[in-house]
Amino acid sequence: MSAPVYKRILLKLSGEALMGDDSYGINRETITRIVQEVKAVVDMGVQVAVVIGGGNIFRGVAPAAAGMDRATADYMGMLATVMNALALQDAFRVNGVVSRVQSALNIEQVAEPYIRGKAMRYLEEGRVVIFGAGTGNPFFTTDTAAALRGMEMNADIVIKATKVDGVYTADPKTDPNATRYQRLSFDEAINKNLKVMDATAFTLCRDQKMPLAVLSVFKAGALARFVMGEDEGTLVHC
Ligand code: UDP
């Protein structure tokens, strides 16, 4: 069997992905499905770091718009990502994958703090590292945390795993003629005004020449096929 094209990946999982069809929180069946998709690439020898979002529990933007102090709301959002990180770690445990949670906010009774060297060592040992609490700073998103940690971990690529299997020419839900981009350059994505990740995350990746991919974590085997270099999702390259 040929070797994976990507040896170390940073996978961004949105909080919403964990909800399944529920309107809030973590759906057990859904998180198990996601973990099995990730396990498949871990079993192929790919080193996996995960940045997990918090949108299934709390997002800072809406309460801030309703009058809440934005920084406070964002700290709550970051704590939501830590809850998801713990749930994900437990789901990995149940499925026989060893993972470690590192938090960008210090809550040492719950998770170890983010320490770059330690995280790198875990990856080298074949453990999945789950980064909680985003960047640790309000006014940022977990997309930006994914770009940042991806670069810090010297990952080969940042993969945004969503419900949609790539970047489309138009919204596939409303436009039946929408087609998926297989490959895109950063400049093309900007010129065509395509939303791949939030602007800060996108700019960071472009400046550091970190390739990006968007794929569906719910399409069985898509992540594994992508790391093997097959046509899945959309690859955004320099
Ligand atoms: N957040 C933050 N700083 C970060 C990452 C996240 O303040 O570096 C907060 C922010 O309020 C955000 C929430 O945590 O709305 C949840 O993260 P995000 O919205 O990125 O989660 P996702 O959409 O991926 O589920």
Image: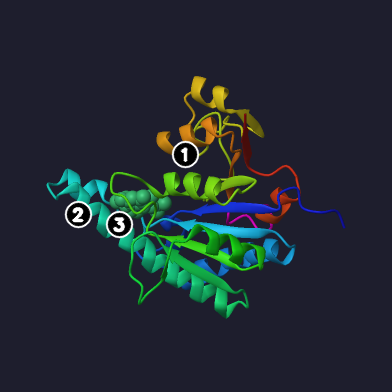
Instruction: Tell me, for residue 77, which label it has, or none.
Output: 3
> Magenta span covers which residues?
217-222
Asked whether residue 1 appears in the rendered view, the answer is yes
- Kind of residue at disc 3: Gly
**SS for dot 2:** helix
Left or right: 39 in relation to 200: right
User: Which quadrant does the C terminus fall into?
Assistant: top right
**SS for dot 1:** loop
- Residue drawn at x 21%, y 50% as measured from the top left: 71
Instruction: Tell me, for residue 197, which label it has, or none.
Output: 1
Q: Earlier in the sequence, mark 2 or mark 3?
A: 2
- Residue drawn at x 47%, y 68% as measured from the top left: 101
Q: Quadrant of residue 212?
A: top right
Q: Earlier in the sequence, mark 2 or mark 1?
A: 2
Left or right: 136 in relation to 1: left
Answer whether residue 71 is magenta in the image.
Answer: no
- Kind of residue at disc 2: Thr
